Amino acid sequence: MPDALPRRRITLTVNGKEHSAETEDRYSLADFLRHGLGLTGTHLGCEHGVCGACTVLVNGEAVRGCLMLAVQAEGCRVTTIEGLADDDGALSPLQQAFMDNHGLQCGFCTPGILTTLTAYLRDHPNADEPEIREALSGNICRCTGYDTIVRAALAAARTIREGAKA
Amino acid sequence: MSSTAFVGQRVKRLEDPDLLTGKGQFLDDLKLPGLLEAAFVRSPFAHATFTEIDAEEARAMPGVHAVLTARDLPAEMQGQRILLQVPHPQITNAVTQEPLASREVCFVGEAVAVVIADNRHLAEDAAERVIVDWEPLPAASHCDAALKPGAPVTHSSMTDNIAGRLNLGYGDVDAAFRNAAHVVEERYAPHRGTGHPMECRGVAAVYDVVGDAFRIWTSTQTPHNTQRAVIDMFGLSEDKVRVITPDVGGGFGPKNQVYPEELVIPAAARLLGRPVKWAEDRREHFLTTTQERDQVWDVAAAVDADGVLLGVKGTLIHDAGAYLPWGIIMPYISATTLPGPYKLPAYRMAVTVAFTNLVPTTPLRGAGRPQAVFAMERLMDAVAQKLGLDPAEVRRRNFIQADEMPYDMGLTYRDGAPVMYDTGDYPQAQALALAKAGYDDFPARQKAALAQGRHIGIGIGNYVEGTGLGPFEGATIRILTNGRVAIYTGAAAAGQAHRTTLAQICADEMNVDVTDIDVVGGDTGVMPRGAGTYASRITVNAGSSVRVASIELRGKALALAAAKFDVKPEDVELTHGAVRIKGEQGDSITFEELAKMTSGMPGYALPKGVKPDLEASGYFTPPQATYSNGSHVAEVEVDAETGQVKILKYTVVHDCGTVINPMLVDGQVQGGVAHGIGNALLERMVFDADANPLTTTFADYLMPTAELVPDCDIVHMESPTPLNPLGAKGAGEGGTIPAPAAIVAAVESALTPFGLRITDCPITPQRIVELIQTAQETIQEDH
Ligand code: FES
Ligand code: FES
C-alpha cells in the first residue's frame, strides 16, 4: 500500500459552473460529485451499476455515476438533479409532472430517474408508454410501483411537445 | 366547525419540492464538520469462533484514527447485547446481537471490528488488513432442516435451534376433521426475500463533551427505539440522547430495528471526540440488514360437502435467522392472520420458531401476513379443485358477512386484545374485484388464448390485515410567533408523506392552508415518546392525535382571542390564520399576534385569567387494532417454454376505512403490489448448504422493474372504523399482502393444461420450467 494514493486535478463543468478540484484516481464520479463538490442530490443505491439511482448526464447522455471514474469526466459537461430546474428555480416540465402525478415517495431513486428521463424525453419526445417503461427498466424504485412515474413521464412529454410547438 | 377542505382530497405532497431538486437530506448527505467515516470488519463465515483480532497493520494505515474490537468498546458496553424490542413469554432463547461480536459470529456479515478513518475509502482499505483467527463451525442453513435431530446448532451455547414455540387456536378441531366430507392437505413454502429500500441504512453521531450527550442521526423507522437502546446500553437519562431521522429513503420494515452500528458509531464518536458516520453499502445491506425469508406450513382444511370450512389445523416453521431482534412477533402475526375473511369454526396452529445461521428476520412490509394469506388462499384453491368448484364460489360460501361485524375471530392479537374485526364488507370487496377484472368472461378468454397456444390464467387473493396498532403515537401542535402552525410528532417518515397527511388533518381543524403548516417528525428531541412507523399505524395513531390536539388548540386560540376581545368564545371563529369576531365588521387578531401574546414578549399583555398556552398535545391510544381488507385479482400470461410471466391485468379492491388522501393511498397500494410481485415472481435470497449468501447484488437478486409491474386498477371501498376519530385504518401494506397468493394462483391457472400445483413462491422462470418438466415426467410415467 503506497503512502500517498494517486490523485489528480480535474476540471469539468457541473450544472453550468466550471469546477477544478483534486480527486483520488479511484473515486467514482458519483462520490466526487457528492463528497468532492458537495452535490448530494445524486444518490447511490447499489454502487454496482444496476439500480440507476446515481445516474447523471455527462455531455447530455445518461451515465451511471457509480461506474464512471471522476477522472474520466475531465473536460466534460455534467448535469445532476441540482441542475434540472431553471436558474430562477422553476421546476422543469419533468420535475413538475412528478409533483403533479405523485411520481415519488421517499425520493431516493428520484434523482436518477429524473436524469434518465430528461435525456430520454429530449431524444424521444413522442415516446409512448411501453417505450417509457423500457427506458425506465434500468432504474429501480422500491416505493412507487412505477405507474405514477410513467404517467409523469407521459405528461412531461406532452408539455415538452407543446412547448416545442409554441 | 370542522370542514373537510383537505381531508379526502388528492392534496399534492409538501415533501416534493425539496426531493425533486436534490435538496433532500438523507443520512449520507449530512455535512458535519470534522466528520470521520467508518467501515466494519465482518465475518466471512456463517458460524465461527475467534480469539484474536490483529489490527496492528490497520491501525498504522494512512488516515486511520482507530480500529475498535469488542474489547475496545467503552466499559458500559462490555458484555451487553442490544435490547430485545418485543419480549414475549414464549421465547425460549431471547438472544440479540452484541454491538461487536466478542468470540462467536452466527451469520455472514456479523461485525467484529470497526475502522474509523478520514473517509470511507481509507476505512475500507484498513478493514481489509484486519486479521481474525477464525475457527469455522458447522452452520444451520434452513429452518426446516435446523429442527431435525442432529442439525448443527446456530449458537454453540445452545443444544437445539428452537427460539420459541406458540400454540394458537380455538374450537374442536378434531371433531371438525372427523365430521369433514373432504380434507385437503398441503405443504406451503413461501419465501419473503428482503426489504431493499433504495437507501441503505446509515448512522452518524456527535458526542457533546460539555453536556455528556449524544446527537444521533439514523436512517430508521423508529427513532425512539434507537434512543431506548442507546439509553439502555450507556445507562444514560433520556435527555442525553437525541435521535433524529433525516430524510429516509424507504423503510418497509427492515429499518424498524436497532442495529449494532447504531450503538458502535456513537461509542466511536465519544471515544474519538469527533463526529463519526457509517453509511451501509448494498453488499452490507444484503448481508446484515434484517430480512423475512422462509416459512414452512403443513396445513390441512376440513370442509363439508359444499366446501364450507369446518376447521383448519397445521404446523408452521418460521425462520428467525441468527438472533431475535423483534422477538417472535412475525410468526405470531402469521398464525393469527391465516383465517382471513372467512368463517373458521375451529383452528389449531402449532408454531416453531427456528434459529438458523442466517441474517436475522424481522417484519417486512406485510410482516408474516403475505405467507399466511398465501397458505389460506392456496387452501381455498385446493378445496375448489377437490370439489370441482370455482375458486371464487368457494370463497363466497365462506365469507364473514358485513352484518356480522364486529366479528370476534376467537384469537388474541399481538396487542393482547381479541382479534375483533371492526368493519368491512368482504363479499362485496371480492364481488367488486371480480367484476372489475372481468372474471366471468375469463373462461372464454382463456379458451381463445389456448387456441392460439397462449397460456393465460387468473387468480384471487383475499385478506384481512390488522393495522393501526397501539400503544400510541403522539403529536404536539403549536401556533408559532411567525403565524405558522407547527406539528411535532414522534413518527418518522420514509416516503409515506406523513407531512402532507398530518398537515391535511390539522389544516381542516385550524382553518389554514396545508402550506401554512410545518411538520417536524421522527426527532426524539421534539417528541419525547413514540413507538415507530410500522404495522401501518401512523395515520391511525399520529393522525388521530393530530386531530384531537388540533381541536384542543383551536379551542385555546378561540378562548384567548375571545378574552382579548372580551366576548364569548362562541362569538369568535377561525379564518385563515386569524381569529375574528363573527359578523360583518368583526375585529380580528392574527395567529402571529396570538402567539406573541403567549410568548412572554414584552409589549404583549395576556388577558386576565388566561394561561400563556397556545399548544396542545395528543397521544391517541387505540383500544385495539383496526382491520383493513381487500381483494386482488391477477391475470397473467405464462410462456411455458421460458417460464416468463407477464401480468396482463391486476385489480385491487382496497378498504382502509376513511381515506385521508386518495392519491397517497393509491401510491401505497401500487407500490405495495409491486413489492408483492417481487415476492411472487423474482425475489429470492439464496444461501448455500453452509449458510453462505449467494445473492448479494441486484444482478443476482432481482427486483421488479417498470417493465414487469402493471398499472393496477385500484378501487377504494370505505368502511370507516368506529375505533378512532378519523375512521381510518392502515394502508401501507395491503398492496403487498395478497399479491403472491393471487399471482401464483393465476400462474397455476395458466398452466392448467399441465395439471400442476404450485405451493411455493417466488416462482422464478427456472422454477416454472422445472414444475412443468416435473409435471410432464409424471404424466409420462403414468402412461
Ligand atoms: S448506484 Fe449506480 S447504478 Fe446503483
Ligand atoms: S421513491 Fe422511494 S425508491 Fe423510488
Image (tube, coloured by chain):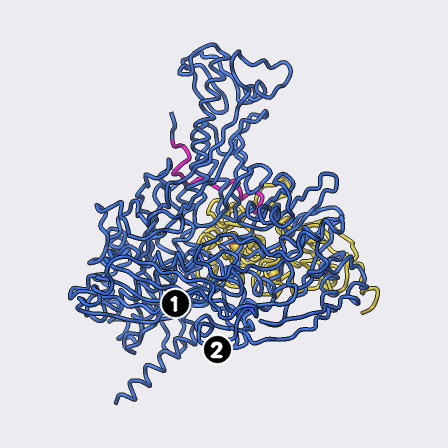
Chain colours: A yellow, B blue
**Residue at far right of view:** A3
Disc 1/disc 2 C-alpha distance (Å) = 44 Å
**Residue at far top of view:** B566
Of A76 and B731, nearer the camera is B731
Q: Quadrant of residue B309?
A: bottom left
Q: Can residue B299 be seen in this view?
A: yes
Residue wearing tag 2:
B150
**Residue at far left of view:** B305
Of B437 and B239, nearer the camera is B239
Which chain is indicated by disc 1? Answer: B
The residue lying at 28 percent from left, 77 percent from top is: B755
Kind of residue at badge 1:
Lys
Kind of residue at badge 2:
Gly
Which chain is indicated by disc 2? Answer: B
Q: Is A68 displayed left or right of B456 in the figure?
A: right
Quadrant in which the C terminus of chain B is drawn: bottom left
Where residue B184 sits in the image (x, y, percent)? Answer: 25, 70
Q: Is A42 displayed left or right of B169 in the figure?
A: right
Quadrant in which the N terminus of chain B is drawn: top left
- Per the rendered image, the range of residues in magenta is B4-19
Q: Mark 1 against mark 2, which lies toward the viewer? A: 2
| Main SS class of the magenta portion in the image | loop
Q: Tell me the SS state at disc 2.
A: loop
Residue B244 lies, with reference to residue B160, above or below; the image says: above
The residue lying at 71 percent from left, 38 percent from top is: B211
Q: Tell me the SS state at disc 1.
A: strand
Q: Is B169 displayed left or right of B51 in the figure?
A: left
CB at mark 1 closer than 8 A to ligand 2?
no
Of B47 and B500, nearer the camera is B47
